[in-house]
Amino acid sequence: MMRNQYDLNFKKSIVSKGLENGNMTAVARQHELDPKMVLRWARELKRKDIDQLDGDGKKQPKYVPTAEDYAQLEKELERMKKLYAE
């Protein structure tokens, strides 16, 4: 079963309708959405982690090492090998 991907503007509009209405569950059911999912969107919007609502934020690592980082780690590894070999 394929998961639906909703864009950020759609999520914002659903959450704002729920906030205006005062009933997130009713708005979710009007749009044939799972109420738990809409409540999660509202929590995430409230936390201001809006970039994570697209789903891409969760898939991307926070730190991406560069080639320079790898080179520095290689030097450190060689130094450690020499220290332990003595």
Image (spheres, rainbow, N blue to C red):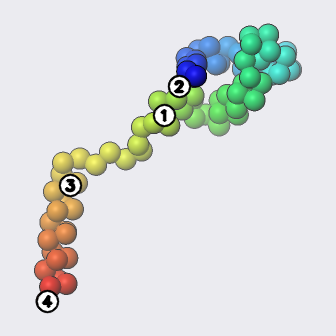
Give the mark nearer the N terminus: 1 vs 4.
Answer: 1
Residue carrying label 3: 70
Decide: marks 1, 2 in contact (CB < 8 A)?
Answer: yes
How many residues crowd mark 2 within 10 Å: few (<14), some (14–19), many (20+)? some
Q: Residue at x 81, y 22 (%)?
A: 24
Q: Residue at x 37, y 47 (%)?
A: 63
In the image, what residue type sits under mark 2?
Answer: Asp
Residue 69 against residue 7 in the figure, above or below: below
Residue hosting label 1 = 57
- Does the CB distance between marks 4 and 2 fall below 8 Å? no
Alpha-carbon distance for marks 3 and 2? 31 Å
Q: CA distance from mark 1 to mark 2?
A: 7 Å
Dots 1, 4 in contact, CB < 8 A: no
| Secondary structure of the residue carrying numbered label 1 | helix
Query: From the viewer's perspective, is the residue at label 4 or at label 3 nearer?
Result: 4
What residue would you read off at disc 2? 54
- In this view, the residue in front, 74 or 18, is 74
The kind of residue on which mark 3 rests is Tyr
Disc 4 target residue: 86
Element assignment for label 4 = loop
Question: CA–CA distance between discs 4 and 2?
Answer: 52 Å
Q: Is residue 25 left or right of residue 69?
A: right
Foreground residue among 41 and 33: 33
- What kind of residue is marked 1? Gly
Is label 3 in a helix, a strand or a loop? helix
Q: Residue furthest top?
A: 30
Crowding near the residue tagged with mark 1, few <14, some 14–19, many ≥20 C-alpha atoms within 10 Å:
few
